[in-house]
Image (tube, helix red, strand yellow):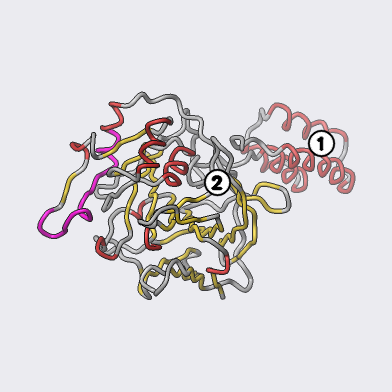
Amino acid sequence: MQNKKPNNEKKIESRKGLASLLSSVRIDEMWIALVVLVVVGAIAGWTFLSSLPGPVAEIVEEILVDEPIRHPLTGEVIQEAYESLPQVIGVMVENSADAWPLSGLDQAFMVIEAPVEAGIPRFLVLFSDEDEVDKIGPVRSARPYYVDWADSLQALYGHVGGSPDALEQILDGDTLDINQFWFGDYFWRENGTRFAPHNVFTTIELLIEASDRLDLQPLDYDQWIYGEVEPAEEPVLLVEIDFADGVVYDVDWEYDIDEESYLRYTYGSPTRMEDGANIWSDTVAVLAMDIRTIDNIGRKSIDTFSRGNALLFRMGNVDLVEWRMEDGGRITFYLNGGEVEMHPGVTWIEIVDDLSQVEYK
């Protein structure tokens, strides 16, 4: 996927609309020349629009308005474009009930949730280096598929050890690895109120400090394209995800029409962070991936570099789309052969074996 570029088709349509509307309003040659002058040179500026006849002003404004500048990671409209891409920080956070309450997930721009041993989900929590989050965790060990997702955004990858396959993958690859085993000064353990291994935490500031020991290169990760999604006329208000046997790790997302966002529930109650914050997401994507158990411990293999079906929940809408991920690229969504414009804001990606694990109403 390429970086966001101007929409040439829209510009072509605008030029066609210009000719048609000029003909219909029958303005004289002087005004035609003036429109051309403003479009080509933009000399007079926006204040000049008020002095033009209404139809002419609308045409000029339509042609001169550029696509909005958007944040590379959230798609939210910003005032100035970035000179370079922000550094992504990815942290492995567990979701064992013994680790609750968790910290930091509510402040991420993206979270990817997938099963590990015993069907218990674990999170890759993704932040920008602009964010200030003073507690993230509990931090746990790496798995190969999380490494793939972190690498797809060239993220600093904070974790505590990992499975043999994950550690070998990190050793042989280009992961910007911040393993607590070797970077102990950039993590801490909370003793007394928590017990190992559910008591390791870090911060964005610490992980950025740790990255000074890495060989960082200029960033060139893929960016999604973004567009505003209209609210559904008859919104889907509840998304239920059956992650494992029993109900402890099942997840519900409840759409709030007023907030135009989804509130996360765990075990029937809002998922609360240690500081009492709730988790909200502007987009919930549920992806069906090939998940297999590979050893007697219950470790999983997930076919990340592939494609499959996914459900996109945005603004109360639900769309059945295709997800794709190629080696060196990130997860991207397609509908009718074209790349989906993602809704701006926070995105949560849920990984399941099959979309039959998802119910919505």
Residue at position x 88%, y 38% in the image: 28
* Residue lying at the far left of the rendered structure: 192
Left or right of 16? Residue 285 is left
Give the percent coordinates (x, y) of residue 278: 34, 64
Specify whether residue 206 is painted magenta: yes
Q: Residue 30's quadrant in the figure?
A: top right
Residue at position x 54%, y 69% in the image: 358
Specify whether residue 197 is painted magenta: yes
Q: Which residue is mark 1?
A: 31
Magenta span: 191-208
The N terminus: image quadrant: top right
Q: Which amino acid, by three-letter code, is at mark 2?
A: Ile
Q: Which residue is mark 2?
A: 331
Q: Crowding near pointer 1: few (<14 within 10 Å), some, many (20+)?
A: some
Residue at position x 57%, y 67% in the image: 316
Left or right of 133? Residue 32 is right
Question: Above or below — where is 320 with respect to 323?
Answer: below
Mark count: 2
Q: Nearer the viewer, residue 164 or 233?
A: 164
| Numbered tag placed on residue 14 in the rendering | none
Give the percent coordinates (x, y) of residue 49: 67, 40
- Which is more N-terminal, label 2 or label 1? 1
The C terminus: image quadrant: bottom right
Q: Main secondary structure of the magenta part?
A: loop
- Helix, strand or loop at disc 2? loop
Left or right of 49? Residue 28 is right
Give the percent coordinates (x, y) of residue 110: 44, 50
Distance from the alpha carbon under mark 1 to that under mark 2: 49 Å
Q: Nearer the viewer, mark 1 or mark 2?
A: 2
